[in-house]
Image: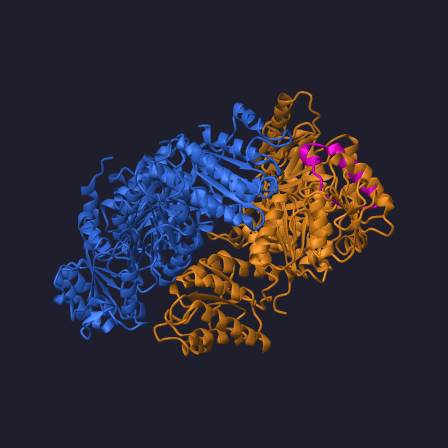
Chain colours: A orange, B blue
Amino acid sequence: MTHDRTAVREILEKARAEGRTALTAPEGKRLCDAYGIATPGEGLATSAESAAALAAEIGFPVVLKVVSPDILHKTEAGGVVVGVSDAEEARAAYEKIIANARAYNAEAVIDGVQVQQMVGGGQEVIIGAVTDPTFGKVVAFGLGGVLVEVLRDVTFRLAPLSGDDARGMLDDIRAADVLDGVRGAEPVARDALADMIRRVGDLVGDFPEIAEVDLNPVFADARGATAADVRILLAEGPVEEPARLSREQILASMNRIFKPRAVAVIGASAETGKIGNSVMRNLINGGYRGHIYPINPKASEILGLPAYPSISAVPGEVDVAVFAIPAKFVPAALEEVGAKGVAGAIMIPSGFAETGNTEGQAEIVEIARRHGVRMLGPNIYGYYYTPENLCATFCTPYDVKGNVALTSQSGGIGMAILGFSRTSKMGVSAIVGVGNKADVDEDDLLTFFEQDDNTACIAMHLEDLKDGRGFFEVARRVVRKKPVIVLKAGRTAMGARAASSHTGALAGDDKVYDDILRQAGVVRAPGLNDMLEYARALPMLPTPKGENVVIITAAGGSGVLLSDACVDNGLTLMDIPPDLDQAFRAYIPPFGAAGNPIDITGGEPPATYENTIRLGMTDPRIDALILGYWHTIVTPPMVFAELAARVVAECRAAGHDKPVVASLAGDTEVEAACEYLFDRGIVAYPYTTEKPVAVLGAKYRWARASGSMGG
Amino acid sequence: MTHDRTAVREILEKARAEGRTALTAPEGKRLCDAYGIATPGEGLATSAESAAALAAEIGFPVVLKVVSPDILHKTEAGGVVVGVSDAEEARAAYEKIIANARAYNAEAVIDGVQVQQMVGGGQEVIIGAVTDPTFGKVVAFGLGGVLVEVLRDVTFRLAPLSGDDARGMLDDIRAADVLDGVRGAEPVARDALADMIRRVGDLVGDFPEIAEVDLNPVFADARGATAADVRILLAEGPVEEPARLSREQILASMNRIFKPRAVAVIGASAETGKIGNSVMRNLINGGYRGHIYPINPKASEILGLPAYPSISAVPGEVDVAVFAIPAKFVPAALEEVGAKGVAGAIMIPSGFAETGNTEGQAEIVEIARRHGVRMLGPNIYGYYYTPENLCATFCTPYDVKGNVALTSQSGGIGMAILGFSRTSKMGVSAIVGVGNKADVDEDDLLTFFEQDDNTACIAMHLEDLKDGRGFFEVARRVVRKKPVIVLKAGRTAMGARAASSHTGALAGDDKVYDDILRQAGVVRAPGLNDMLEYARALPMLPTPKGENVVIITAAGGSGVLLSDACVDNGLTLMDIPPDLDQAFRAYIPPFGAAGNPIDITGGEPPATYENTIRLGMTDPRIDALILGYWHTIVTPPMVFAELAARVVAECRAAGHDKPVVASLAGDTEVEAACEYLFDRGIVAYPYTTEKPVAVLGAKYRWARASGSMGG
């Protein structure tokens, strides 16, 4: 796409020079022309006679609209006449509009009256762009009229966007079928719509000073799309992108922070109950093998380690300083930490922005920046990195090593992560509190975990993003390699943002987060427990090679509920080919049901489970298995668990690898059976048909987004 | 409302006598007239001249439509001309329609051309009725056009319906705001629309032979509503309501089945591993105190009890016979059971309809009916009724007495109920398998549990309803007294039903079940685990007196997630009045946040929790509390649990009763704390912010439906 940037630049500069934050309709049209966005034929009339002449040239019917920088709501001002069908009417409409406009606002500068080709018919849609406080330039698409206004059936993407992103938007609204033509209407030209969406994305991407764009309505039919009304608003002040560190800069610090050779504890204490004591104990008891330097001016030794009056007095290099002192002592200590060349300050203390002390927080950010120290927090529990046996926290140590990295913006959620991890024996590489996120945020952590061989999956609890675009860019890259699970809290608190355009009003809720996280390929967890379960299960499950999911169940009742859950989670129940159906039938009783779910019926011996699971694992057309176990005396829970684990392991060893999840219905012995299965790579839950399928669904969401399916 | 039933009867009889299953447009209009459903002014023209005269009388513009019993799709036949604006056009339209109709179907009988007032403008809606295979006559309401066709934004109610039901339908569509006027449109006359919905409900309620009604479109504006097009289809064969037993008849049997003085086990066995042995053991070990009669022709004693060769040989009366013999022996044994005057046959054996043996099932149903024996099953695990220590099942005994009754259509789900109950120590009054539901179904069980003082809450897993209307009527009554929780499985399997009308096509999915279960006041659980958690928690929670929910949390992060969950579950976060806000502030740190959630901040001592919870319990303006605990060394989990349980108990003792749920974020000790709280009437969960709020939401759904709020 070639765009006439110079023409746009000129118009914007003129408007901004004049102190305007809204473009006139003719200016808007010229911007559209420069970016190849189709608008109706039109011209500016400055007399009743020229209105009539212009209308004749464009072709009737036309619509006449007042052009005035001082009149934003043209209809309200009586400044619009539609359906003008001959020269006589055009003259009359011109006079009427001028008279109405004067009556509405006697002070208004009136540039003239726009005469415009009357468009309509086809499908009415809205295409717009808005400046989101988190993500910056965001493009919106929805159907016009009631659908978008009442049902908020609209979808968002970060601008600029790819052709795939733009075409994806057309499918992403609930009423997408309308575009294919309903009630005898012809399908709209999807390419033309997607093209217009991209051009709007390019426009706001190229010119950050454009705050909002409203093409509303756009009329689309089989031949193309025309933006019947264009409204463009400009930002008031200067527009700046947030500063971002390079990947190399981030990694230089993060590698020292997560793999430190030496850790200092500022405010280390020998007194039980003090945070500085807990941190020391956790570092020592956690098994950290680097140097630990307790810093305390009043002690010569703490927990058997030599103490130093200040970090400056420490003989060797220090990578990380954990702060365990009150907020008021932080700035001075941080200056020393900076002077020492420490890479990371782990700022446990509270009493900063979260209590209203924003100045205090700004002060320590300034100190850290000045010295090139990266700061985690303040107001955090600390962090864990198990490959280094590092428990730099006042909570209890955690030692189940694994490949899930978890981060949380809230200390309470961090504690829930710890408790859940311990009780479910979830293998963890890192647990990190980000707290007030005064410096280090999710972008930095993602950048580290991306290249960290100890991490295969990242789960993040967050309430906001400091730099949504920065997050998007890193996340989209990381997702190609590892699942990124996000629990975005505060889904419902964003409704109050003021907005001056139609698109702006639509963007004021969680939908923007939702759409853009999805655009990035992030797996959004609907709740805390889901985030934890996804984190635990996703790294265990192999990536499916295709969409064919098969349910093998002994309980018909579970089969129905598992099928419901598949639909809820966007999974496709495989249409079983006749030969495979016959192969399954060979193993199940005559009154069992092949098809999908495959109902092997209750009361069957272990061999029936074993044969059908083996067939499911080895047939290459099946991409994922959901097992429904039913507790009977013929095949007790542990017998099932042992056989399922063995068959799956054998098949995996023979090269037949695919995700397997299981729902176990039975008496309490099924709990131990689930643990046994989980330990052996089969995601299994008791008393629920929803959870195993939800986890498989999350794996599929990631597999699709990462492009790793079919490989 | 007075309806002219005689007029309708005549029209329907004529049509059925002529073998027609569709009424003509004039017939449809006459039905509408008889039931006070407004339609446009119209008449039948049989010549071009009379068409012009009629049109002049009705007032232009008019629309002309062919009238022929042989032409159902009038537009397709070229049989419709709209926007006819004078007499000349009317004459031309008449000629054109007749010519087109002849060309379309030369054989068609043409009664003439309908001349109709042209309506339009206002809001287009659809009102219809359909005969649902489960529920019978069901009324539908939706917005016309794209909304209903693409988004299926439609709602259903059982017919006939009350004024509240009809008005509720207007609010129940997603695009309900459209009726209040959007984009400058005036609000529609809601009363007129609700009235038309009721009249349609009355019509199909009074005349079961009407299979489907389509009023589409109905034009509604501020003045009223007019059905512009009426389509009425008739049932082909005779229409019958299913036979229903009276409440007294049901209870006479059910009371004997659940509180039997004597139980016979047909096929009792001394051999371990046999079903007839398991049933005997469970009856004896479960502690059942009535007579147990083992029936086995080959034994004189089983497990220390005298055995009988047949039930006829048993000396005393028998209330229940548990069948533990193969299907082929059932009919003969059932004849004897019937002759003995047994109230209930617990039909454990499989091998009936579920394996395709529908004749076998019909045979035993016939035997049972003939003898007045109520039959549970076949193909079930049996049933438990803990107040009588009755474990009439081949599963393991269950002895945690409580007030929840659970039923399941599937054996696997029954086993999951048992395991979950045992592990969560859920107090249960009954667990009942209904299996093939050849006789006893949910209606019978609801009728028993309704009047059973040992049952305070009923949870049912079901895949279908034999008699949806029967279920609706019982459930709606029971819900006034006790919560009825339903897990309806197979939400997605109903799409394939054929339908010949617009409304019929819309009714072909789970929406009908969903709407009508809600109309009955049933709390529908989205999944198996939800059903189990609701069942466990609902009877524990006091009924809230109003909608004011308050969150008290130590973790800001939990507060945000708990708020999200409140919105997801339709709960209202109370707008805290200034005096109450001040009262809370007195207990929390200055940087804590009152408002709602009330963020008491982390690291607070037990007193802060205690004071704020006490205030929340005692202030009468607060109706329900959600607690968010954050594990710290200052207030460890068991300290919190003890204080929360104590404060709530003290307040309850002082007459301040309201539901309290809690989310505990912390290390593994929070699990024991949750158990402690659950045992003391506070619904508490670890590692989740969603579950406690979902359970409270379920309690609210019941409280609203039962009309017990505010009392």
Residue B291's x, y, as percent?
19, 59
Up-down: is A359 above or below A431?
above
Is residue B614 visible in the rendered structure shown here?
A: yes
* Residue found at x 22% / y 55%: B257
Q: Quadrant of the C terminus of chain A?
A: bottom right
Q: Nearer the viewer, residue B190 or B563?
A: B563
Residue A240's x, y, as percent?
77, 40
Quadrant in which residue A370 is drawn: top right
Is residue B53 visible in the rendered structure shown here?
A: no
Q: Nearer the viewer, residue A1 or A170?
A: A170
Residue A395's x, y, as percent?
65, 48
Q: Magenta span has A543? A: no
Up-down: is B109 above or below B695?
below
Q: Nearer the viewer, residue B478 or B104?
A: B478
Q: Quadrant of the N terminus of chain A?
A: bottom right
* Residue found at x 81% / y 46%: A307
Magenta: predominant secondary structure element? Answer: helix
Q: Nearer the viewer, residue B154 or A588?
A: A588
Residue B435's x, y, as percent?
31, 62
The part of the chain drawn in magenta is: A346-373
Up-down: is B119 above or below B428?
above
Left or right, B590 with reference to B309? right
Q: Magenta span has A348? A: yes
